[in-house]
Amino acid sequence: MHFVKSKSKIMNKLIFLFALLILFACGQKPQQTESVPVSFNMPIVDSEITKSKTKPKNVIFLVGDGMGISQITAGMYSSDKKLSLESFPVIGLHKSYASNNLITDSAAGATAFSCGVKTYNGAIGVGPDSVAVETILEKAEKKGMATGMVTTSTIVHATPASFIAHQPSRKMYEEIAADFLKTDIDFFIGGGKKFFDRRDMDDRNLYKEFQAKGYFITDYFTEDLRKVKIPMDRKFGYLTADQDPLPVAQGRTYLKFASNMAMNFLNRKSAQKGFFLMIEGAQIDWGGHANNANYIITEMLDFDRTIAQVLKFAKKDGETLVVVTADHETGGFSINKGSNRDSLVTAFTTDYHTADLIPVFAYGPGANEFAGIYENTAIFEKLKKLMGL
């Protein structure tokens, strides 16, 4: 009986090997299971664009400041439909630590993205030696690409500042504002008007200096951006608040529309050479610092609505790489026992940042580069390669 079973096993193996030979003879390969990229089979993305080996013409880089896995999860369970983030076909994780601390801040985190260097907390576009490092936005400008930034913080806050300025401290807001005039950025929207026209360190009126450089720069302090008509032969700056913009829960609604406005403007501005656009959902982080779950969720959902608009543009365009990530997690935010879809029981371990691994989502030409686990500085290297900088 034992012999019969052994013989049967041998025959089964021979049959399996014979079947493989037939498959290879027909030019087919046995089906394999891939660990990455992950496909959610949702209609908003086109997997063929993501699998394409071609490089992108445009890059849209979105930062949900303070957005860790739990912040995304809370937004997902609080939404009446799937998040746009759930549709991304490629997902990775990055290590967010700074050069001088396992817990990074937004300045060091954004400088890792923008310059490809690990630096100290508080550093804006400089390395650990405080020496300026050229940013990816500046490199894109040199290549002739159009460039822009949109944020729900002040435009001189740590994340946007790290893409355009070079200062030893994130608190040097007026110096950061002046650094804007050293670049040729085509489009920017965010708060912080006071750092441009009512400065303590000097008597400069940066509004007038921008206008002298050919910018159309304005501040309505309203949500009705639709009333703003931008001449295509001008560069554009719009300051949405004197200091910090309002939270979504208090009436701020401009992120989605401003991001769409930026994409269309930059796409027309540099139709041949492409564009680089950084979009920040800044106040997810502020909700974490405040240990306020509702603040986190409302900002998370606003950011996701913006992502949906970006994906819509990228899908139609076919030449745009979209990368979404965060600089760090904020609050040690968790969803605990007793939670359900209608009511989340949440808790926090800190009012500062944590060292959690941070998710990276990618769609479009070159997206497969962002699968896996890597340093936050690798995001800069991947973008630089794909953009041909």
Image (cartoon, rainbow, N blue to C red):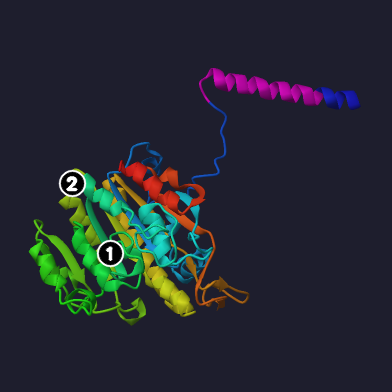
Q: Residue 344: percent from the left, percent from the top?
A: 54, 76
Query: Residue drawn at (40%, 74%), measured in percent from left and top?
Result: 298
Q: What's the magenta region?
A: 8-28
Residue beneath the point at 16% across and 52% down:
269
**Of the pair 12 and 306, the residue shown nearer to us:** 306
State which quarter of the image contains the C terminus. Answer: top left
Q: Is residue 166 visible?
A: yes
Give the residue at the far right of this rendering. 1
Q: Which residue corresponds to the image point at 45% horizontal and 56% vertical from the top-left?
A: 118
Q: Position of residue 149 (x, y in %)?
A: 27, 61
Q: Residues within 10 Å of mark 2 (few under 14, many from 20)?
A: some
How crowded pointer 1 is (Cα within 10 Å; few <14, some 14-19, many 20+) is rated as: many
Is residue 18 located in the magenta-colored stretch of the structure? yes
Q: Where residue 209 sits: x, y (%)?
A: 12, 67
Q: Which residue is mark 1?
A: 150
Quadrant of res 56: top left
Q: Which residue is rendered at x = 48% and y = 51% of the image?
A: 91
